Image (cartoon, rainbow, N blue to C red):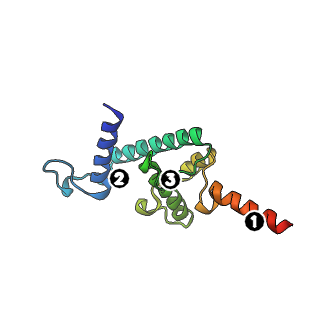
Amino acid sequence: KSEQEIDDQNQTLHNEYILNVPGEGNASSKNVPPKSNSRYRRLKKRMWDKMFEKLKQYKAENGDTDVPSKYADNPHLGNWVGNQRAGYKCFRAGNEQSIQVSYGMSEDRIQLLESIGFRWRDSEVIPPKRQSAWEAMYETLKQ
């Protein structure tokens, strides 16, 4: 199968398991396996691992993990990075029981993300234009 076909299949399974949206055909939401299902857990892990690999690839190409939320080359990656930040915030606040809130965040995932230099807050990310404007103003003020 092509990567796109696998992505589509994973998205369909994600919709069925998480959103309780029936897939193609006559599936109904009462036929959707519970979220505690081992197949669901494996799917979610595979999806997370795949996005983590895409984030590592982004870093190799761009030098950082600061994927824009509306990243044209891979919109899913930009959304995923935002979800990791939101999940981290909820996890640290003690809301890790709800996968809907914490996006499955765990200490292991936090360590993996930090191992590649992931920044948890958008405020840690200063776009180059803003950085250079700040530095120019700082130099002016120093004089």
x 13%, y 50%: residue: 26
x 42%, y 50%: residue: 75
Secondary element type, mark 1: helix
Q: Amino acid at mark 3?
A: Val
Look at mark 3 in the image and give the residue it sits on: 81
Disc sitting over residue 62 in the figure: none
Look at mark 2 in the image and give the residue it sits on: 36
> From the viewer's perspective, is the residue at label 3 or at label 2 nearer?
3
Graded by Cα atoms within 10 Å as few (under 14), some (14 to 19) or many (20 or more), the crowding at tag 3 reads: many
Q: Position of residue 31 (x, y in %)?
A: 19, 53
Q: Amino acid at mark 2?
A: Ser
Look at mark 1 in the image and give the residue it sits on: 137
Quadrant housing the N terminus: top left
Q: Tell which of 44 and 62 is nearer to you.
A: 62
Q: Tell which of 115 and 95 is nearer to you.
A: 115
Q: Position of residue 68 (x, y in %)?
A: 52, 54
Q: Position of residue 85 (x, y in %)?
A: 53, 58
